[in-house]
Image: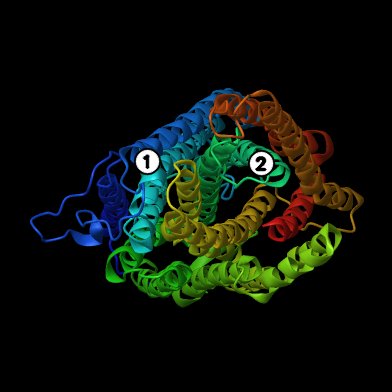
Amino acid sequence: MGASILSDFGAEILIPVCAVIGIAFSLVQWVLVSKVKLSPGRESVNNGSGAKNGYSDYLIEEEEGLNDHSVVLKCAEIQSAISEGATSFLFTEYQYVGIFMVAFAILIFLFLGSVEGFSSKSQPCTYDKSKICKPALATAAFSTISFLLGAITSVVSGFLGMKIATYANARTTLEARKGVGKAYITAFRSGAVMGFLLAANGLLVLYIAINLFKLYYGDDWSGLFEAITGYGLGGSSMALFGRVGGGIYTKAADVGADLVGKVERNIPEDDPRNPAVIADNVGDNVGDIAGMGSDLFGSYAESSCAALVVASISSFGINHELTPMLYPLIISSVGIIVCLITTLFATDFFEIKAVKEIEPSLKRQLIISTVLMTIGIGIVSWIALPSSFTIFNFGDQKAVKNWQLFLCVAVGLWAGLIIGFVTEYYTSNAYSPVQDVADSCRTGAATNVIFGLALGYKSCIIPIFAIAISIFVSFSFAAMYGIAVAALGMLSTIATGLAIDAYGPISDNAGGIAEMAGMSHRIRERTDALDAAGNTTAAIGKGFAIGSAALVSLALFGAFVSRAAISTVDVLTPKVFIGLLVGAMLPYWFSAMTMKSVGSAALKMVEEVRRQFNTIPGLMEGTTKPDYATCVKISTDASIKEMIPPGALVMLTPLVVGIFFGVETLSGVLAGSLVSGVQIELNEK
């Protein structure tokens, strides 16, 4: 079969070095962002030399009130309020989630440990009875540890993303005084801090965990990587609560601010007289930054763990070939370097000089990263894989060539790009779909809703075909391992994807701060242009999250079927068909619960905003400040309370179905929820 060109030592050096480079690069971006000072006063010229990106240039123009000390101080004050609100929410959320995390970790230990009656004796290996593996009690303990590691990494990723976003929003506003290009660079660099920290931290923690676990497991690689799967479960579990809690918060605040402020009182969206405006800006950070960061980390961790588990019972694991075994981590490592180069195109190689260049620059990031990553995948597949090998395929070993595995990763990578651009086409106001929906508003809300629903349904078609082709190609070449690495390919440029995604909420906050600080109309035009591009790119990020989640879910479903010794999932079997029906219903049940939660929270928010407008003298005249803190508290309390039932539904359903109705019914539930969930997600993005 041959050996890989890259030595085991080289692979073990490459992965942590790339992770450290990613962390270092994110810190450099943070330092550059921090050079924008949140303090009043004119920027000074540095001996006439003029620093790059305008950090020591004179302001491009002088407008009335532009350099007034009170305006700059107001920006700092608003940023502080947003940061405090977001931090308070996340700490409160993490307290509740921490209780769940500990409880679920105990359940994992009890369920896995009880397989052999909590025996501490070695036992025959699951996939090769002729060999002796570590006891089930050890697998239970190490799986629990890796679950906690994944959960903590997910929480830290979301929190760090939120902190850099709230750190950069006012700085983006102040940079807009120098021109749209300076503000764009600040917002994008801030997003890059989050993207690279998440990608590098996730990779480094997983790599360190594997090496520490190896000290105990030794040559028992199947047991080692089965225990590592807890890392992906922990990441996705925290992502669930982060997405649900943050989503309820941001939508409740958004609805409350818009319904009363824009519709009833006819004031601008981010008018400082609106009591819900701070809560609205906080929601952008806890929902679209912290939530999305945890979400994509969960998909990344699960796809990596799924690929490692299948590889451990393939020729890589059987023959103890370390470099090919670490192929998924090497892909992620190269992805960090590729995204680093790609980021320089946005911040250093090209300069944004006009509003119309913003959105093309962001889309160029996706194209450049995908092209460079395709080359990187080709090189990695050539040096890290033997020319031929075998992959575990439902009890058999399937012969695979290294070029076939390259195609599996590449098809996932390019499918992600296609999904991203299709999402952009259906959500950008530059194209006919959104223009048609806007035109339908002329005849009232009814036609607008009809056109909007039709557009949402239609937007599913091409992404589903892209996902279907990816599944067909990757499964044909390398079975479930191919699907897992295809998902990893889609997430290999996660640093760039997250930078683009985080750019949107940062720009949105920057526009809100400009409005609340009373900055000039020209400044608000620039921040609005940044925000408009960010709204589209945020949808692109959701497209990547959905596509990768679909592939990861299928790979995990295959792992479940193999581990549960289910030869076929026969839909004509009553148990399986019932499971399919129930599983297909679950995403609708989950959506109904979250929508009702948003409605309940929004109702309280609307009532509070109305109360303040009606009872606080001088509020509409701008002579009295609204009570922002009460609105922030309403969103926080409602989202924390309402996130528990949907989260419990998702986490407890597999346990209840598996225990009371068996693995066949559970396989139907998982398949039905996967197919149904992908359609709903694509429709609602």
Which residue is at the front of the view, 132 or 533? 533
**Residue at the spot x=55%, y=51% of the render?**
299
Answer with the quarter of the image where residue 545 lies.
Answer: bottom right
Q: Residues within 10 Å of mark 1 (few under 14, many from 20)?
A: many
- Between 431 and 479, the one nearer to me in the picture: 431
At a point 44% along the width and 62% down the height, the residue shown is: 493
- Residue 585 position, x and y percent, is 83, 48
SS at circle 2: helix
Element type at mark 1: helix
- Identify the amino acid type marked 2: Gly
Ranked by sequence position, the earlier of labels 2 and 1 is: 1
Q: Is residue 25 above or below residue 646?
A: below
Res 131 visible:
no
Residue 261, disc: 2
Which quarter of the rendered picture does the C terminus lie within? bottom right
Q: Is residue 225 above or below residue 377?
A: above
Give neighbour class at mark 2: few <14, some 14-19, many 20+ (Cα, 10 Å): many
User: Mark 2 and mark 1: span between their CA atoms?
Assistant: 23 Å
Left or right, 614 with respect to 420, comes to right
Image x and y of residue 374, in percent: 42, 74
User: Which residue corresponds to mark 1?
Assistant: 71
Q: Taking the image as drawn, is residue 17 in sight? A: yes
In this picture, residue 124 sits left or right of residue 329: right
